[in-house]
Structure formats: C-alpha cells, structure tokens
Amino acid sequence: MTLQPLPLLPIGPQRSASREVGDRLELLHALIAAPTFDPVFRPDTMQVPENHPVFGWICRVPGCRRGEESMHEYCNVHEDQWRTHRDAGGNVVDFLRTAKPLPTHAWADAPACLICPDVPAWSQMSGLCFLHADRWNKRSSYQRRKHGQAADFEAWLAAASPLPSFGKCRVVVCPEKADHPLGMCRRHKNRYEREGRPGGARLPENWGRWLLDRGKPIGLDFGDEDGFRRWCSTTAPISRSNGKLSLLGLQPLLKAEIKWAMFHHAQQPDAPDWPVLFIQRLANDCRSQDASSLVDLDLDRCRMHSAKIARRMLRFLRLIYFTRPDSKDAGFIETEHFGVRYRHRDSAIDLGGVSQRWLRDLLWDWMAMRLTTDPPRSRNLFDFTRRGCVELSAYLEVQAPAGGHETALLDKSHMDAFVADQRHRAEHGLFGLGIHNRVGGSQPSVVTTGVLTTVFGGVRRVLRMALDSGESEKIGLDRGFIVAAPHGANKTRRRRPFPDSVARALAAEENLRQLDALDFEDRGLRDIWETLVVTGRRCSEVVEVGLECLGRLNGLALFWHDQTKVGNYDEAIRIPERLYQRLEQRREKTVARFVHRHGRPPTGKERLQLALFTRRSRNRSGQHAVSYTWFSTAFRNWVAQLDIGHAVAHQARHTLATNLLRNGANLVHVKRYLGQVSERMAEHYVHLASTDPRLEEALNAVWVAGPGSAEPGLILSGGESMTRQQAEALAIDLTRRSTPADGGFCTFQPVVNGNACPFNMDCHNCDKFVLSGADLVYWHRKREQWRTLAERAPDPATADFLHDVFEPTARAIDGLEKALAAVDLLDDALALDLRRPQDYFGRIWSTAFRARDLHRHETEDAA
C-alpha cells in the first residue's frame, strides 16, 4: 500500500468539472474583490513595491536603486562588498554607513521618448526612442565631421516628428510597450535576434524613412508567420529584478489562485521571502505545462524553488476549497478548520492510509471531537492514533472478509487475530503492514514494543468513542470486535543518567569544539548543550528562551525560562558565572543579526519578543527559535562522531536529578528545581531504587476516620503546633499501632499484632480503617474513577446509586482536606504522590496522636 498525495479539490459525484472550476473561480474572485484584499495583487501585471515586507526586491543599502540578488539582501555588487567587509571582521552597521548607493543599470519602467509620447525611450543618456536615438547619433556624427562642432540638440529636438505608437509587445506574456516596428520591446527583440529570428519576421528597406519622413505605416514580411506567432505566444517574459510580475497568458483560475495565495502568504506571521522572480518562474512553468490550475501542475517538472512555492500555495488553497465535510469525504482532516495549528507541522493530517471508509470516518470523527473539545498540546496524539488505524486497516484489507469494508462481517475473532499478528511482529522484529508516514517512500516500519503500545492505544481510542457515542451500532459494527481491542499499556524504559565515561566525553573541551564545528551557521548549538548540562532544563525550555533570559538579582546570575509543560512561566534559577557570560555573548550575536537585517538595534519591546537562539529561515522578525529537531539531529551526529554509544540530550536532566539527591537534596528539592509535576515524577528521574525517598518534615501525620466509620472524615489525629514535650507525650508510633492497607492504615489491634483480618479485608467499609494525609492523592484518583463510572451509567438511576455508594468515601475525603487545610498542609499533600511499603515506616507517616489526648491537651490549654 502506498500513500497518495493529499487531494486538493473536493470530490462530489454530482458536480461536473466545468461547474467545479466555475465555483472555485467565483469563490476566488469574491475573495480578491474584498475590501481587505491588498490592491497590489489584483492586476494581471503586478508592480510590487520595492520595500514590500515579503516580496520586496530592492537592495538594502540605503539609496541603492538596484534589485537584490535572489535569496540575498543586497544587489550583486553590494553583496560582494558585504562579504569582504564581514570576512575582515567588520559589522553591518559600519558597512551600511559606508556603502555607496548605485544607480540602476536600466529603467524598471522606461519613460516615454522625449519626442514620441506613445513610444518608450531607448537610451538613458538621450531619453529618445530607438529610431530617434539612431537619427540623433547620425546627425551629431555628421555635424562633428562636417563642421567640427556638436549639433544643437534642443533645436533638433524641436524640429523632430513623433512616431506613432507601436502598441503592446507582441509577446503574449510581456506587459511592456513595443518600442520597435517589429512590435516588440527592446529585450524581447534582442532575445528574438539571439534565438535565430523564428518565423523570419523582417522590416522593409528604409522603414525609418517611411515612418519619420513620410508618415506611412509599415508592414512585416514573414518567412513563416505561424512560426513567428507561435514564438510570440510561447516565449517567457524577461526575468528582471524590478518587482514586476506578469500573469498574462495564464488561465483565469490559475491567475486568481496565484493572486490570492500571494496575498494570503503576505498575511502570515514571519512569512518566508518569496522573490518575485521565483513566482514569475512558477507562472512560466504553469504556462509551459498549459495548466488550468495549480492542482494540474506537475511539480516534478518545475524548478526547485517554483515547486516549493507551489506546494505552499496549494496548502493555502486547500483551506478555502474544502469545508469540513469535504475534507472528510476526501480522506484528510484540516486542523485549521477547527482553529488549531501545531508548530512546525502541516495543518492537514492525511487519513488516506485507512482504506475502509467506516474506519476512516470514525478516525475523522474522533479527531474532530478532540479538536473541538480538548485539542492536545501537540499533534503526536493524532499521529499515534492514525498509525493504529492504518495498521488495523492494512490487516483487515488482507485478512478480513471483503477486505474489512463490510462491518457486518467483522466480529471478535478478527480483532483477536489482529492483536496476535501485531504481537508476533513485535516479538520477532517484523515490519508492519501499514504505511503511515508520507516521508521516506513506501516502506513500512518495524513493529517494536513501543509501536505496539501506539497501535493498540490508537485503535482502542477510536473504537471506544464509536461505542460510547452509539456510532458503532449505526454502522453495524459488532460490540465484541470493539471490546476485544486491548489497552496500549505503556511499558517504555526510563532514560538512564550518563555513565561517568560518557559524561566526561560530552564535557571534554576537544569534543565540545567538534560540536561547535557542526554549527556552521553559529546558531548556538554548543550554548544550548552547556545550558542543558548545567541547569537540567527540558530541551524545549532552553531552545525557546527569549533574548532577555538573563539577569542579575542581588548580584546573582539568573536564567529565566518558561516551563510550559507544567504551566510555570518566568521561572528563574541560578547559573554559574561562566554560563552567564557564554549566554551573554550569544545574546550579543543575536542582536547583531537583528541589526544586520534591519540596519538598527532592536527596541525595548522588540528585545522582549526576540528569541535567543534564532532560526535561519522564515524568521524575519527574529522571534522564532531553532527547532528541537535541529538540535537533536546535530547532537545525535555529534555523539556518533565521538563513538561513545547511544546517548540523548535528555539524559542530562536525569543525571542532574540523581546527583542532586546524592548530594543531600530530597525529592521536594528535586521536584522544585527541575519543575516536576509531582515527587513521583521526580523519583522517576533520580534513578535510586535502593534509596528510601522519604521526604523529611514534608507532611505531618493527619488522620481521619475512613468511609466505613460512623462519622467519615472525623479528625482522629492532627499536626497542630505544640511544644516538643507535648508532642512526645501524645505521639503514637504507628509502626506498632497500625498496619498498611490499600489507601490508608488498619488500626484493629489483632490485625496489628499479626492475626488474620476477621472482616475479609474489606478495609474501605471497615470502621477500623483510617486515612492519612499521605493518602489524599490516592483518594482523589478514586473519586475521579467513581465519577467516571457514574457518568457512563446507562440511566440516571444507576448513576444516583453509584453516587450514593461513594458518598461516605466523599465525606471522608472532604474531612481529610479540611484537616490538612487547618494545619496548612493541604498543598503539600496534594503535591505528594509517593506510596511504597517502606515509606509507611518513615517518620513522616509513622507519627500520629490519639484524638482523646489531643482533645485533653486542648482542654488544658483552654483552662
């Protein structure tokens, strides 16, 4: 199975091709006629302003009138001068101050002849048309030769007779006026001569005398008039860096598509530069292929830059040619139809790899539901889910009756067979059946344990939503087929800290110079890596920092960053002076790049928006940072050069977390320094399974009665402030007076002494069961679980029953929260997510107080 290119035009069984083209042309004409549409892009012959922010074409040296070299910022002469100046150590500010502006080689638009108002001037020196310039040169030469003095130009000019207009250039695509009796502009006449005069067009003898002296019109003689006209209709416009774009000779729909795409591109933030010369080449390619629309264009036959621009134009057009239902029928989903756009990713997600229409529709519906109600933070969830459905589709196409297209023929056995097939492929390292990635050709990927998790999770998400919504019943899909889809249990391994030998290799100065050498554009590759090692930040938190990420507070060097994954913004941590100085140098380089592009330093507001590590392309304002892919690819290549085995940058975070714990920090410190969600996640990073991760003094013992007691949530023991002597007198050693249970502790003395539980270990309904402050997160999860069950109840009566059953437990949880809040421990309890058997014997959880002793202590204080 191979992936087909994403469709562009909506497919409708009752729509003819002519009606479809007409509808699209009407739509584009309406958009182009809108008052918000830039009038620069409306004519078939556009003259783009020289300083246009996206399509500008003039040299950046102030006062220079020459067009910039393609993909550069200066004209040819100034580009060479700038490179020499830069290589000598100069900066752009000095270059722009000393560079001398240059006049243009030729007119961008030739003015009218001084004598003939309807004929363009030919010579910049005299301002005359071709014939009058020739006559004046002959007159001037004769006067000098005959009389030894120059002729009177003003007198000759006053006596000269004007020529009639030669009309527009005969070349169909040329917007210029003809300045020669052949009916061509100067440049096309020169091209006509160079190409051997196709068709043999020629003027009669003494045609100039006929025009000037007798005022008679002249005709053309042809050796092959059809050949001449064919040349005029097929030759391309003259390529010039003057901001002029000719769409003449293109089909009406194609003209409208290019106009609207150019306008839409100009509205994009930090849109990449599109030289007008490249767009003209694209128009020439469309004309040579006789395309009626960009959809018909064979991009493989286009030049590289033309094809690149055409692909982006097609993405713009897809947004207006398709509605949501159209995209569903065509086999893709457009996230921008839902107001969602993921960075560095295409907004269209291709679903064409799912061949069964019912499965593809279910996948589209699931994605539409998530985009509408809860868009994920990245596109990975959609890609993973699509991958699962592609694998299922490929299997059904081969193994199921009717290729899996008939839902009535599918049952539990087919899903069981699919699951067994996937597990077999994962166990033996075989290739999958489906092709889910458009990039890389038509080869499937190897099924691994991680892929297995992705596939099963994706299939189950889509099918379970269909079951819950009732859609599966509508399409006749067997319930057994759906429930047989297993969970995608995530059993991926954790990253390990760097071994000592690897850490030394990654920090060696000689090796770091190799890393620097890979950064041939000096975007800050080594700076990013050293910051990751020193700070232990997530890679994206370093890559995407702003220019003003450095600062000093009371003399301390600070690194400011956003922890977007956990919702912490403007977080600051101390950094060594050496790293501070290195990042300060990077900041100076970034500012110099801004000055190079804009010819001035950034304002205070612009500095707040600039990225520290700026990417090269599509970054006119400097607000976009290099991508994680760019950094990870370069880092991977560096590690391969060092020959130290497998290593990834994220291991630096694990290494720092482990070293922090070994040097006296506890999990609370690790969590706060690394910006973790919970201590459990911090424990995931420290990699010390043999170490007891007790959080000393993190949570005092607060106990409430369990859900099975007469008064759920009643405070049994609290952490109220008291003297040390009072606390020692009232403290209960819970290691001797209780035993751990699921979600709390059992205080029934026979069980504490080691006897069997006489209540069949029904802890949650037992009045001897108590909750502690360390159990709060566990019971929050239980509450969410019961709420989910109640929401999925088939009728209101069942939902009410489930709520009533859980009501005592809810009161116990509320009581526990109130008790923790009373002693200012609620936030710490909510942040605590660590329950292992050995923790129950730590002092945090093992110390509590009898309720009657606490009551007596309070009475004595009141007396």
Image: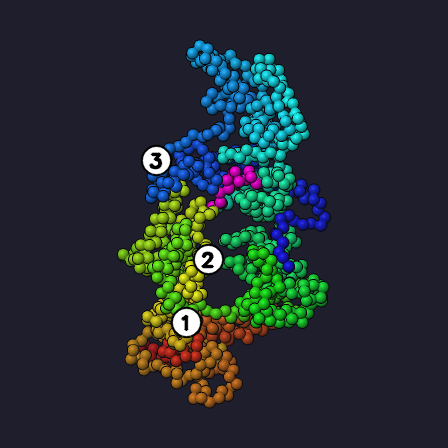
Q: Do the residues labelled 3 and 2 touch (CB within 8 Å)?
A: no
Q: Looking at the picture, does residue 347 appear above or below residue 536?
A: above
- Residue 389 shows in the view: no
Circle 1: residue type: His
Q: Is mark 1 on a helix, strand or loop?
A: loop
- Direction from residue 515 to residue 437 in the image, left or right: right
Magenta segment includes 274: yes
Q: Name the residue under label 2.
A: 633
Image coordinates for residue 440, horizontal then vertical, percent: 56, 56
- Quarter of the image containing the N terminus? bottom right
- Direction from residue 330 to residue 675 in the image, left or right: left
Q: Residue at x 58, y 51 (%)?
A: 337
Q: Residue at x 52, y 54 (%)?
A: 345
328 and 70: which is toward the camera: 70
Q: Looking at the picture, does residue 527 appear above or below residue 142?
A: below
- Residue 198 shows in the view: yes
Image coordinates for residue 227, horizontal then vertical, percent: 66, 30
> Magenta stretch?
270-282
Q: Is mark 3 on a helix, strand or loop?
A: helix
The tag earlier along the polypeptide, 3 or 2, is 3
